[in-house]
Structure formats: C-alpha cells, structure tokens
Image: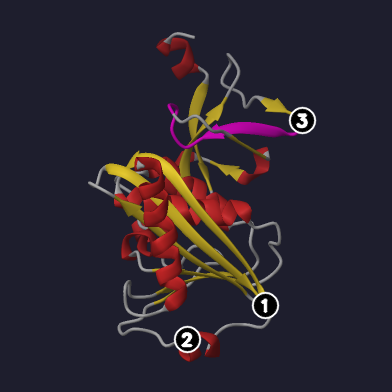
C-alpha cells in the first residue's frame, strides 16, 4: 500500500476525547466489520483496536488531555511526600484488594532494561522479572505497569498499583498529553479502562518499603541475568 492510498483509507475522529485514525472505504465511509471499526492512535503503530462506530465522535470533539477537568476514568493518584510505613499503606486499601508493586530499571538510559512486578492478593504472591531489551528508564517504568495490567484476569476487584515513578503516574492519572512514548501510554490507558476500581499510589523509591524494594530487585536482576 503506497502512502497516498494509506492516507486516503483513514480519517481523523475522536474516541474517548482522544484524536484517532479511523479506517474508511474509498468513499470515506467508516469501514465496519462485525459491528466494529478499526482505529489507530498513530498510523505507524503495530497494534490496532476495534471499537463500535457509535463510540466515535467528530474530530473537533477531541479534548486536549491537559485541558480535561476530571482525571482519567477509574484512576486516582495518592501523592506521598514521605516514606510510607506498611501499616499506613494498609489503612487506606479497600477490602479484597489486589496490590501490585512495579518498577523499571535501565543501565545507561537508554540501555539494557528490565521490569519487576510483585502481585499480592491475600496470602498469594506472584513475581515477574523480565528483560525488555534496550530502553529508557521511563519506558521500563511504563512497561512494568502495562505488563502488570495485562497479567490481571480479574477486572472486577479493586486494584492498587504502587510505583515510585512520578513520570508514569503523572501520565496515567493526570492524563497529561505524552510527548514521547505515546503508543505505550495509550495502550496502558486502554488497559486501565477495563477495571472497575483502579488507583495508583506514589511511593518513594529506596525508602525501606520492602515490596517496592522487591520490585526494584526483580527489575535490576533481569538486566544482570541478560548481561551474564
């Protein structure tokens, strides 16, 4: 497909207040397959979404993220200015809550990178330590959150994600318009919409919170294992 044909096969519209590209036929009509249309946030992105035509709005109804007066659906930021003690964390958590500690690490920024995730649900724990190749620290932090959300099968339970990344929490809870890593951010936002009660809690890194230290260890260990 040449660039001219590709440009003619898509048109700008608004989806959940974000500008997207929507696939059309030769006459500019929405191309509906099985009741849904194909959208992309960027024409060069690899992954695609299919949504119902009625969820799309004219392009001029897209609202710049920084101008929104309400936070992203189902998200919440709890800013912590001093190191949290474990009993302080537990006090504000809802019953039957899934706790997730995420961290990303990069040796070189950009450089060899890894992610670490610790899931806690009642007495059950699960750990993920994964090398993600060459990336920046910010990409690693965001990727850890994305992988954590992809792993969760229960979307009906309260979920609390603990992160020491102000960059990631700002993008995902204040709905800042990303200047970099746009595809990754939009993918995470789409994943967030699946959950009925999802909140982010900001913690300080290397401040003695053992679960956060575990996530950090898992992220850095992934890098070390790949370099061996």
Say whether marks 2 and 3 touch (CB < 8 Å). no
Q: CA distance from mark 1 to mark 2?
A: 15 Å
The residue pinned by badge 2 equals 86
Dot 1 falls on a residue whose secondary structure is loop
Dot 2 falls on a residue whose secondary structure is helix
The residue pinned by badge 1 equals 122
Dot 3 falls on a residue whose secondary structure is loop
The residue pinned by badge 3 equals 34
> Does the segment drawn in magenta span residue 194?
no
Which residue is at the front of the view, 45 or 144?
A: 144
Q: Residues within 10 Å of mark 1 (few under 14, many from 20)?
A: few
Left or right: where does residue 7 sit relative to residue 39? left
Q: Is residue 55 visible?
A: yes
Give how far across and how far down residue 105 sits, in percent. 34, 54
Which residue is at the front of the view, 115 or 150?
A: 115
Identity of the residue drawn at 67% across and 83% down: 95
Q: Residues within 10 Å of mark 3 (few under 14, many from 20)?
A: few
Identity of the residue drawn at 35% across and 46% down: 113
- Vertical position of residue 165 compared to residue 211: above or below: above
- Vertical position of residue 15 compared to residue 69: above or below: above
Q: Point out the stretch of residues depicted in magenta.
A: 35-44
**Mark 1 or mark 2: which comes first in sequence?**
2
Which residue is at the front of the view, 158 or 119?
A: 119
Left or right: where does residue 13 sit relative to residue 98? left
Left or right: where does residue 95 sit relative to residue 178? right
Q: Quadrant of the C terminus?
A: top left
Identity of the residue drawn at 55% across and 50% down: 190
Give how far across and how far down residue 218 sits, in percent. 44, 59
**Mark 3 or mark 1: which comes first in sequence?**
3
Identity of the residue drawn at 75% across and 34% down: 35
Q: CA distance from mark 3 to mark 1?
A: 41 Å
């Amino acid at each position: 497909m040449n660039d001219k044909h590709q440009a003619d096969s898509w048109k700008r519209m608004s989806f959940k207040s974000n500008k997207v590209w929507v696939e059309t036929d030769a006459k500019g009509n929405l191309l509906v397959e099985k009741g849904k249309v194909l959208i992309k946030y960027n024409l060069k992105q690899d992954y695609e979404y299919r949504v119902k035509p009625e969820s799309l709005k004219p392009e001029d109804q897209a609202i710049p993220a920084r101008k929104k007066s309400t936070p992203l659906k189902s998200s919440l930021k709890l800013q912590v200015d001093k190191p949290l003690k474990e009993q302080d964390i537990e006090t504000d958590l809802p019953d039957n809550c899934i706790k997730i500690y995420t961290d990303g690490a990069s040796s070189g920024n950009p450089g060899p990178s890894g992610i670490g995730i610790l899931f806690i649900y009642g007495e059950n724990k699960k750990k993920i330590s994964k090398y993600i190749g060459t990336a920046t620290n910010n990409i690693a932090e965001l990727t850890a959150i994305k992988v954590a959300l992809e792993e969760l099968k229960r979307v009906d339970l309260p979920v609390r994600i603990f992160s020491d990344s102000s960059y990631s929490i700002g993008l995902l809870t204040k709905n800042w318009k990303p200047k970099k890593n746009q595809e990754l951010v939009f993918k995470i936002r789409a994943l967030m919409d699946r959950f009925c009660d999802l909140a982010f809690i900001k913690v300080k890194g290397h401040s003695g919170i053992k679960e956060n230290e575990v996530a950090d260890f898992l992220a850095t260990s992934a890098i070390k294992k790949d370099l061996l």
